[in-house]
Image (spheres, helix red, strand yellow):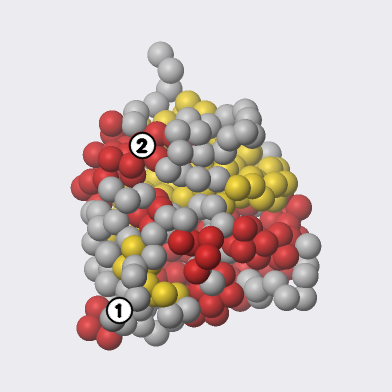
Amino acid sequence: MAAPIQKGTDYHKTFGAKAYLAEFFATPEGDDEEGEFLSKILKELHEIFNSGRLKQGSRLLDVGTGPTIYQLISASRFCAEIVCAEYTQNNRAEIEKWVKKDPDAHDWSAFFKFVADLEGDSSSWEARQSHLRDAIKEVIPCDVTKPDPFAPRQYEEFDAVITTLCLEAACPDRESYSAAVRSITRLLKPGGTVVLSGVTNQTFYTVGGYKFFTLPIDSSFMREVFEKAGYVDINIKSFPATNLENNTVSDFDGFVILNAKKAEIE
């Protein structure tokens, strides 16, 4: 009998942060089965955050950080404060180990070098690492399926909110996905930037021998959700999966990068 697919609170018990990092985040080029997923995300994040979206000294909230920090590298050069919000303790521990330079922490140096090359200063990667470590002020628990994902913590509104590969894994249906978008971006300033990356039409992915549920959605649904949540200037880029026939770790058919502006209060 096949093992049951993992959902929701199962992440606390069965999601292996180390296995996830080893399988999918060894290099910026990504793994063989899922193709050039990571390098494309890094390039898109570079373009978004080097287009003047953030001013120096900005505050950023990363929702569903997982055990990763690659998604923060481009934005962090403009940030004085970053709050990482993540569901599972094991994932939060991985971020904290990296911030503290624990020898057991995942090595992200290749990712910093990749982004530094994009920025035209390959020698800056170590300084960029140090800056991100200093900018991460908190690593907190969150649950995006709750009306207040960050309770009991209270924050002033942020200049930007990022969420990557989170909502489709956390939300059991489209209604809860829509509610999560509204709840996590209540802490975004009017005029602030939201950036989301996600996979399309995926029903599962596999980590450490466990199969995890994913809500199958597409870019048109994402656009509809953000329009209804009060966002303008919505830009979505879609990228087809490049190795569908040989991918045994997931069944996504592509991924998207969405960025939008929270409507100003009139």
Q: Calculate the distance from the C-alpha at mark 2 to the C-alpha at mark 1.
A: 32 Å
Secondary structure under tag 2 reads helix
Q: Is 219 drawn above or below residue 31 in the view shown?
A: above
> Does 131 sit left or right of 43 as displayed?
right
Q: Which of the 4 quarters of the picture holds residue 61?
A: top right
Q: What kind of residue is marked 2?
A: Ala
> Is any atom of residue 212 visible in this view?
yes
Question: Percent from the top left, x then y, of residue 23?
Answer: 49, 80
**Which of disc 1 and disc 2 is earlier in sequence?**
1
Circle 1 crowding by C-alpha within 10 Å: few under 14, some 14–19, many from 20: few
Quarter of the picture containing the C terminus is top left
Question: Residue 2: which numbered mark, if any?
Answer: 1
Question: Residue 179: which numbered mark, if any?
Answer: 2
Q: Residue at x 25, y 54 (%)?
A: 217
Q: Residue at x 45, y 33 (%)?
A: 147
Q: Residue at x 24, y 61 (%)?
A: 201
Q: What kind of residue is marked 1?
A: Ala
Circle 2 crowding by C-alpha within 10 Å: few under 14, some 14–19, many from 20: some
Q: Are marks 2 and 1 in contact (CB under 8 Å)?
A: no
Question: Percent from the top left, x then y, of residue 214?
Answer: 33, 61
Q: Is 217 drawn above or below residue 183 in the view shown?
A: below
Question: Percent from the top left, x then y, of residue 110?
Answer: 61, 76
Q: Is 16 drawn above or below residue 12 in the view shown?
A: below
Q: Residue at x 63, y 39 (%)?
A: 59
